[in-house]
Image: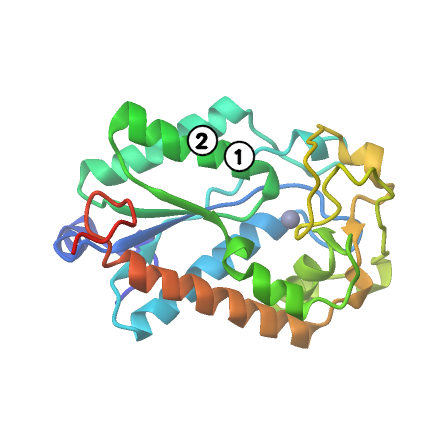
Amino acid sequence: MKTHLGNYSWQEVQELIKDDPVVVLPVGAFEQHGKHLPVKVDEFLVGSVAEESVIKSHKKNINAVLTPVVWTGYSPHHLDFPGTITIQEETLTNLIIEIVESLVHNKLERILILNGHGGNANILKNVVQVLRYKKNIYTAFASYWDFALKEIAEWRKSETGGIMHACEMETSLMLNRDEQTVQMNKAKDHYLNRSKYLAADLLSGGPISVAASFKELSENGSIGAPTLATKERGEDLFNKITDSVSDFLVEFSKWPKPLTGEKNE
Ligand SMILES: [Zn+2]
């Protein structure tokens, strides 16, 4: 089975639809990731996770494909660093809705929106609601790290604050997936010294949200502990994440419609 929807002809897609395949729609971002990582990190990593998860799901005899990665997302908080390309929240919302509507128009109806950028998460969760209540279309949404929060907690070497942006996690994953784009000699740890009411980390959050530009938080653009990253630990974490995503794809492929997660037994 082919992995990428882009490699099918329309006639082959017509055949594929008969099996009601899972469609993974990866959504990334294009933004600065410190001095040591390239600006492609979010779109590249979510594409890698989606591709590997689909390949693993094929080995479990599941029909799944992925669409091309939506490579830009909501990144106004990074815009003051060159190389960042952002779109407005309405643009992202409409873009995802229109992609989903196109898939559903031709009966590709089992869609996981897989996110690779923290700044997109609230917008994409809202998209799932809008699709359901304005269009009667059921989709599922998750950020890729959400599939492995427990594993990440056990995997990490950094203290709280070490996994935030261009951090221990993203740097390890990039060392594993595309080592030549990582400049470890420029990696610098930077822990935020914030109020306990604000998020300290991917894994520990306070109740308060604010909107701060990264220029206000970090001189070099990264937050966390990238110096703890290694290629081997990146491979380990990549496998844990993609195992977990592909396990979900197996279950998702069997969810009865409408796709509520409720078992009609
Ligand atoms: Zn990132």
| Amino acid of disc 1 | Asn
Foreground residue among 161 and 105: 161
Query: Where is mark 2, residue-wise?
Result: 126
For label 1, count other residues whose C-alpha is less than 10 Å away and answer few (under 14), some (14-19) or many (20+): few
* Residue drawn at the location 75% of the way across and 37% of the way down: 198
Quarter occupied by the C terminus? bottom left
Describe residue 217's horizontal placement relative to residue 87 as left or right: right
Q: Nearer the viewer, residue 215 or 71?
A: 215
Q: Are marks 1 and 2 in contact (CB under 8 Å)?
A: yes
Helix, strand or loop under label 2: helix
Mark 2: give few (<14), some (14-19) or many (20+) Cα within 10 Å: few
Ligand 1 is within 8 Å of the C-beta of the residue at disc 2: no
Q: Which mark is residue 122?
A: 1
Residue 4 visible in this rendered orientation of the protein: yes
| Colour treatment of the image | rainbow
- What x and y, as percent, mark residue 191? 84, 50
Residue 192, how many percent across, how many down?
84, 45
Please report the residue visible at 66 percent of the width from the left and 41 percent of the height from the top.
Answer: 31
Quadrant of residue 79 in the image?
top right
